[in-house]
Amino acid sequence: MEINRIIAIAKKQLILNLRFKWGFFMNNFIFPLKSLISFFLIYIGFFYSGANDIGGVTRGTYVVYLTLGMTFFMIFNTGWNAIAQSFMQEKFWQTIQGILVSPAKKIEIILGYGIGGLMNFIPLLSISLIFCYILIPIGIIKFLYIIILLSLMYIIILGFGFIKAALNLSNENISALLTPAFWIWVALSCFYYPITSFPKFLYPIIYLNPIYHTNFVIKELWIYGKFYPKSFFFLSLTALISLSVGIYIFNKVWKKIGIQGY
């Protein structure tokens, strides 16, 4: 794996994304705040109606809880769409074949497009984490552990996003069916609300969701100081499996079906 190739792909994507400044600003600053403000008003309504907590979220923690939730959702959304949207552009420009037959390995392509997509979100990510730190300060070791867990979560999503990219190239009608699956996954990840919002028979499914696991562990660590060191091994293994499966399925789809629809 060559770092220079990854950096070159990421740099190219950032330059392309910065072509339209207002669109860049709206997608990476205004769009994330929309959901945050909606849930912020819901929580305020609950607390002002006399509720003391909502599934363990209290008046003193809900702002950080929601801000972290917004941050996790944006990382999730970026990982899911970064490669797929970029490949669709390359498909219509008829340059995608050049990328796929280039010397760059699939893992380099995934990381390059993934980093390029994440760079769009770095300003808001930094502001969000600094804001949370001002409200609830944490130590440097905990902060670094959180960054590692977020990185692993992003890699997990990139693996699934690579599968979506394969379907975009081969059959856009089938790839459209992934949209409901995406929003179900978002709902079961509990970015903005506690797991107690769901009936108990769904708990086992939610517990198996690595995105919920990351979301829960980081919030527990940041807000309550609870440390879960085993989470690193679980998410590392899941990230490795996600990348391996994503690359395997992409290669199978590309070789068997090819690129269609342009």
Image: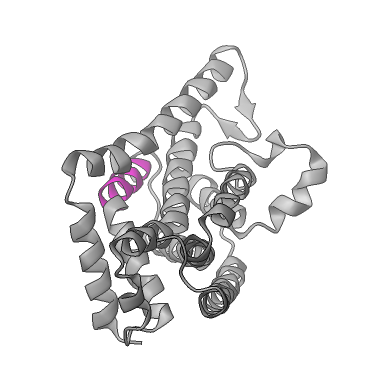
Q: Is residue 113 above or below residue 19?
A: below
Q: Main secondary structure of the magenta part?
A: helix
Q: Which residues are magenta?
A: 122-132
> Can residue 226 be seen in this snapshot?
no
Q: Quadrant of the C terminus?
A: bottom left
- List x then y, in percent, for residue 232: 55, 70
> What colour scheme governs how the chains and residues are painted in the rendered image of this protein?
one colour
131 inside magenta stretch: yes
At 70% across and 51% down in the image, what residue appears? 206
Q: Quadrant of the N terminus?
A: bottom left
Q: Residue 5's quadrant in the figure?
A: bottom left
Q: Position of residue 85 (x, y in %)?
A: 39, 56
Who is closer to the viewer here, 5 or 85? 85
Residue lying at 43% horizontally and 65% vertically, measured from the top left:
151
**Residue appearing at x 40%, y 52% in the figure:** 138
Q: Please, which residue is most extreme toward the right here?
A: 201
Left or right, 27 with respect to 157, comes to left
Visible residue check, residue 115: yes
Q: Please, which residue is most extreme toward the front here?
A: 262
Front position in the image: 129 or 34: 34
Q: Position of residue 150 (x, y in %)?
A: 45, 60
Q: Position of residue 147 (x, y in %)?
A: 41, 61
Most foreground residue, 78 or 148: 78
Residue ID at (53%, 60%): 171
Q: Is residue 222 magenta?
A: no
Q: Would you place residue 209 above or below residue 230 in this image?
A: above
